[in-house]
Image: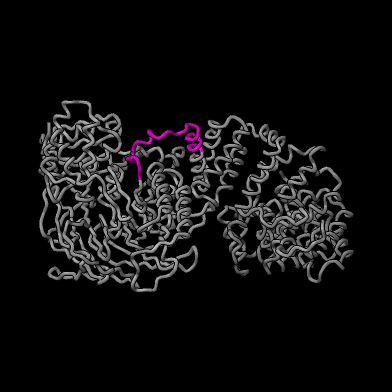
Amino acid sequence: MSSPKIPPYMLQQLADITETINYPIKNIQRIKYTCFDVSKSLIAFGATSGGIYVFNRWPCEFIQLIPSKDGPITRLAISSDEKQIGFANGKGFVTVTECEQSLSGSYSTTSSKEHQGNEVTAMTWNRNMLFTGDDTGKVSILQLKSFIAKRMFQSSTQTIMSLDSRICQLEVKECMLLVSTLTRCYICNTIQEQYRQIGQKLRDGEFGACFANIEKTFTNGTVENTAHDFTEVKKFNIVDDDARFVVGDEFSNTVIYCARPSSRLWEATIDGMVRRTHQFKQVLAKNPMTLVSKEMYENEAYKLENFNNSVDGQSINFSKICSLGSAIFAYSRNALYFLNVQNLDDTVWYDAYNNIVDCKIYNDMVYVWLSNGSLVSLRFMKLDKFLLKCYADSKFRLCSELCAFFKEYLLTNDLSPKLHILGGLRDKIDDNDTLMILDNVIEKFDKLKSTDATQLKSGIYVVDNTYHTQTLLEENIQSRSGDDNIFGQLPPEALQTLKGISVTVSDKLNSSKKMLREKWEDFEERMKHLSIDKNDVTQDSPVQDNEKYPKWIPRDDFTIDDVPLVLEDDIIFRESSQSAIEIDNNNLERDKICKMLYQYSRLSLVNKETETNLNSIIDDYAKNIHEIYDLMLLLEKYCLSIEALDESKFVPNNIFLTYLNNSDNKYDLLNLIIDDEVLYKYFVDSCIAVNIKTQKHSNIGCECGFPLPYIRTSQMPVFSELIDEFIEQQWSSQTKDQCYEVCKRMPYLWRKILYLRRNEDLINVLRILLQMLDENLLHSFLPQFTFETWERAIQLYATLYANICLNCNKKFEHISVKDMLSWDHLGSMVIKSVGGRNAIKLMKRHANLIETGALTMKFYHSCLLVVLYEKYDGTITNPLVDTIYSSYDFKDSIDEVNKILLSASEGTIKNTALPITVAASSPNWGLNEIYKTIFPSECNISENTILNQILMALTMADITDCTLCGLPLRNEVLIEDGGLWVFKCGHIFHGACLNLNKIKLCPSCSIK
């Protein structure tokens, strides 16, 4: 039954994370993922939208969306400290952005244009340096320097290598950079700023290269830290073939593997000298191994096929290779390869997946991304570790079958003493035939057990603990100076605290981070009151008082080996058997819905399309408005549990209002809210909280509750339509006072109150209307203003102009009324309301309230022109005033207005048109499209060029001839004689033609 020829390695499929990964974009067809990367705790996907979708690696859950407006992302890389993400787009721009970003969407970025116009093909990080390669063979470095502000960092960027062909792969180890192109491999010393070619033979195609560690016996002592920071980036120089790099002892166990054609690898020293060639073509002729799928593992139904049946030898070009423990990992479109350079016969490959797009590894984890959007997580491990995992997960039948299959391997090879726990199979297996086969194997397991208990330095005994054994088997765990207990000798009280933490980590590893942190804080607090003498005292510096106590471990640096293993009753750690823990189904469902809602809140920052799914998510869980309210309270607790403190109020408030705003029965829900005191308060608090968070609600109300003046270009508050509907539904004689109270908390709502009181006498609401200083709102009330109303309005405005509240007479300091609505602009509204003559009469009557110079010539000229023009056209007042006010930004336009007034000294005008330089300076006089062309962003234009630009714009708009004479508008003689004139409708004529025909109104419109 056993087979010594089967390599003792297993590839296990872990929990399916595809649904979680695709959740943020599943309902947005236009967005697709384009690339991804993994790190210690993160998975990040770049997308066609330019956004970066960031997930926790374990447990896999969506964290945030980092937006970008530079187009689809083609490649990305997460920094080793997970503080930044570097990414490139199709234009060759390389950008670095922060990983941690606030809910408001603020973030810092820095970018490089070294690869502009090229395709970025490889990226890798080394501390604060991002190395990038492109399809032309250019390699650059973008170095982040120290922060100069809280959310701002500097960077320097430079091209360091220009090679002959496309960059296939970049790898970094300390100061050494490994570059693989289509034809060659290069090893670079970034300190010496030199590089050399590895080997002499060229190749043609996509081939990868990587660093790897080889087993080597180390002497006692420490390696000096040789890390350097760049102070100046220069272009590297190539070294002669017979020259070598001077490298430190830290690279003594490092080798380089370079992919070669026909399933070969070169093995080279760190200084670039090729030592040997590894040929895998024949070993890959064996049948592929069978991976352990989730179903196989759960059903304990794993079957090994005949591995040694030969197929045709595989000639593979390994386009990318990575070091994975004792193996070199590579992949093709339809296969995964684990190449064992120490023992070729232990090489294995798998063909379980087709259409592989990309693969990433972290420690013994392999993430395989398929073209159908699936992301598969796998773990590659040695048989010893997998057997222990099966035993820990109570997969005793599977464990025994594998022991029988690999019986000869287990009997003939040295095994880890930690495998002694598998001796317990004797009590776990009921099949006597299997026990007979495994008798000598189990006997060997028993002999591995040197003692019944292992005593730690703390005095604690660990007895037959599977979790402890499995942890020690982890090949990637770093020793902490050989200490069994980093806290030294602890008194019973401290040990009891550690015991509680240990149980928490063992049984609830995936539960709230907040709970775990609280236990550590409790432990730290207890330790402050304990007298503990540390045996290890730093000799180089005086010992401070606080050094007597254990060092606080930051949450971000906390790892499982920071926790002393204090377990009782032979607690078994079940990594994959979460179903063994009794969980209340209702709590599980609540956690799931809260997680989905929190993910929605993160996505909605950029993708508004996700709003369509929110109501269906909530409706599936909550049946009425009261259950929705309870769900929002649960969501608030969930945000606190995941340490999203700043978002704990905003997220549920925003989701609550979004749900109501998108609901089909919004009217009925608002009625229920109005009738319920608790819901009423929560709705109002939500409106305030959301608008304060988005900074659209701050400092817009006086202490007395009256609104303070709006900035003229202010944005509408969030959910303004929903809030308006809320006020309108409760506007009745019984609830008016309630509406006023809400307005005091949300001064914006006075706008709605004014609308609801629009049929009342204007004098009753004049104070509120003026104090809001909302110009659009004032214009909507202009038809109700009379001469007498304006007299009272001017008096009130004079008070408001001094920054004094019209309700409580208190002065407000943080808003300047004169900067929002000047006397000139108030005058323009007076002209539109009561005409030019009455406007001058009103201002003259209240001249003592108006400071000198506050009314300029554009007010008086507008009054005079309105008096002249309205004789012939009673609808001309509003566009005429707006146009004259706009034209006073240009001297030549002012001169044209003066000419009109001088020519009308007898009280008559030639026509109701305006000179073209005046008309084109405003969007209100029929030439809106021409105005947009000439003044796209209110940019500065020389006065001498305005007429030329207007004529050019007219030509482009195909407005070329005067309809009166049929001649081109750009006739220099006619322009010189009478200019070009425009009626309010936008029709243009020669001034000479209008004068000759004595036309007052637009002839084109009159004919129509």
- Along the horizontal axis of the image, is 805 left or right of 289? right
Magenta-drawn stretch contains 181 = no
Q: Residue at x 25, y 47 (%)?
A: 473
Residue 824 showing in the rendered view: yes
Q: Residue at x 71, y 54 (%)?
A: 983
Q: Residue at x 11, y 35 (%)?
A: 3
Residue 568 picture location, percent across and down: 35, 43
Magenta-drawn stretch contains 590 = yes
- Along the horizontal axis of the image, is 166 left or right of 19? left
Q: Is 954 placed above or below 248 here?
A: above
Q: Is 381 placed above or below 238 here?
A: above
Quarter occupied by residue 981 = bottom right
* Quadrant placement of the N terminus: top left
- Along the horizontal axis of the image, is 87 left or right of 409? right
Residue 997 showing in the rendered view: no
Residue 276 picture location, percent across and down: 10, 57
The stretch of residues the image draws in magenta is 567-593
Camera-side residue of 843 and 50: 50
Q: How is the image coloured?
A: one colour
Quarter occupied by residue 527 = bottom left
- Along the horizontal axis of the image, is 591 left or right of 356? right
Q: Residue at x 71, y 62 (%)?
A: 815
